[in-house]
Amino acid sequence: MSLDPRVNRIDLSKIGNEEQHTNSHLITWEVFHQEKKGKQVIHVGIVHASNPEMALVLAKEQFARRGATTNIWVAKTSDVYSFSYEDEDIFETTPSKEFREAGYYKVRDRIEAYQAKNHTV
Amino acid sequence: MNKEAIKELLYKMGDDALIIGHRNSEWTGIGPLLEEDLAFASMAQDKVGHAQALYQISHEVLGDKDPDTIAFQRTEKEFKCCQLVELPIGEYDFSLVRHFLFDHAELIRYEMLTASSFKPLAQLAKKVKGEIKYHVMHADSFLKQLAKGTEESHARMQAALNFAMPFAYGIFEKSEYEDVLIKEGIFGGEEMLREKWLEKISAVVTAAGLTMPQVADSKIVYGGRKGYHSKFLEPLLDEMTEVTRTDPGAEW
């Protein structure tokens, strides 16, 4: 069956009697973009493709068309493991554990005092 | 350096790029899947960019008219593109096979031109060869995938290849300046390009499980480089220049 929508039109009178084309051979690939060598590779979206080579080829135009790029990674969506959103509460932090957050440490005043004392500004 | 010879080379390359860019852009919005629609349109846009850059060299270095005038205000006879690029988009199999045959020739042509004695063209060649390398990568991936897909996709790719090949050989039609270009080190020549191209595409076609069509010399479609075109170029130019003709020289 053709992927060209103009070739493969659905015959409305036969809906329900015929197997419909679903593009089921196309799986999804997670796409990761790297701006510069050595920088982190960041998830940017997905593409549909039937193999890794084509996923890379298509991802290049979807996600590297604009802006600096040094590399692209793709991985099968089915190879990605994640938590369930139902368990989102595991990420909640109790107020008494603020000391784990960077913002808890108010050291700015100490840095400024040091700089003033040593004339480093 | 022979200005006429360089202009001839810039025009045939620019016209090929402009016309195939216009043709391939016709798939925008009706591509086989969203990602491919976008990729194909983006590559078509690259081609128009190459045409613009080539006409710009003619304008700046040879004192020719500005790129827009060169692109939109010439008659069909003055175009030097090969007939392969003029043909309608047909089914996706043909458009992909044409893209495959054309871009392999483009990549080798620009690689050869990186050593050109005509510096502006050598510089442009170095700048665009990455883009065309991607175009070839894209074409090879699709060719392989569809040739090894289903019975129908394999048959379609083979039929498209058989149909396109006599036109593809027409890419290498020599101009009257061929010897001058080679002698002055401007371009290595169509014959060398054709040999390298044939070797490259034969390897990919065979690896994809397709058969290289044998084309008799008498079946090769020549003429484009001398201004003799298929019946499909004129309507394309009419459409392409419709806006310019309503208000020539308009600025926006």
Image (spheres, coloured by chain):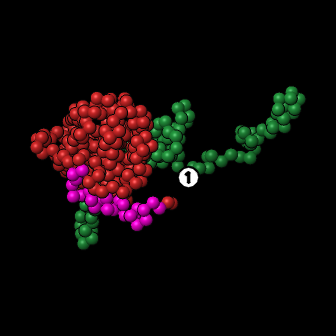
| Colour applied to chain A | green
Which residues, given as a range, are shown in magenta?
B227-250
Tag 1, which secondary structure?
A: helix
Give the residue at mark 1. A86
Residue at the spot 18% in from the left edge and 40% down from the top edge:
B210
Q: State the residue in front, B252 or A113.
A: B252
Residue extending furthest toward the right:
A117
Q: Is residue A58 left or right of residue B192?
A: right
Task: Mark yes or no: residue A12 visible.
Answer: yes
- At a point 39% along the width and 49% down the height, the residue shown is B48
Horizontal side, residue B214 vs residue A66: left or right:
left
Question: Which residue is found at the position 74% from the left and 42% from the top?
Answer: A103
Point 82% across, 32% down: residue: A121
Q: Chain of mark 1?
A: A
**Residue B1 drawn above or below residue B14:** above
Closer to the camera in the image, B62 or B40 = B62
The picture places residue A44, in percent across and down from the top left corner, at: 50, 46
Say whether residue B40 is visible. no
- Number of labels in the image equals 1
Q: Which one is nearer the viewer's eye here, B196 or A42?
A: B196
Q: Residues within 10 Å of mark 1 (few under 14, many from 20)?
A: few
Chain rendered red: B
Residue B27's quadrant in the figure? bottom left
In the rendered structure, the answer to whether residue B213 lies left or right of residue A84 reads: left
**Relative depth, front residue between B229 and A103:** B229
Q: Is B190 included in the stretch rendered in magenta?
A: no
**Residue found at the very far bottom of the displayed protein:** A13
Position of residue A12 relative to residue B215, above or below, is below
The amino acid sitting under disc 1 is: Glu
Q: Position of residue B158 (x, y in %)?
A: 18, 46
Quarter of the picture holding the N terminus of chain A: bottom left
What is the x, y in percent for residue B121?
A: 39, 36
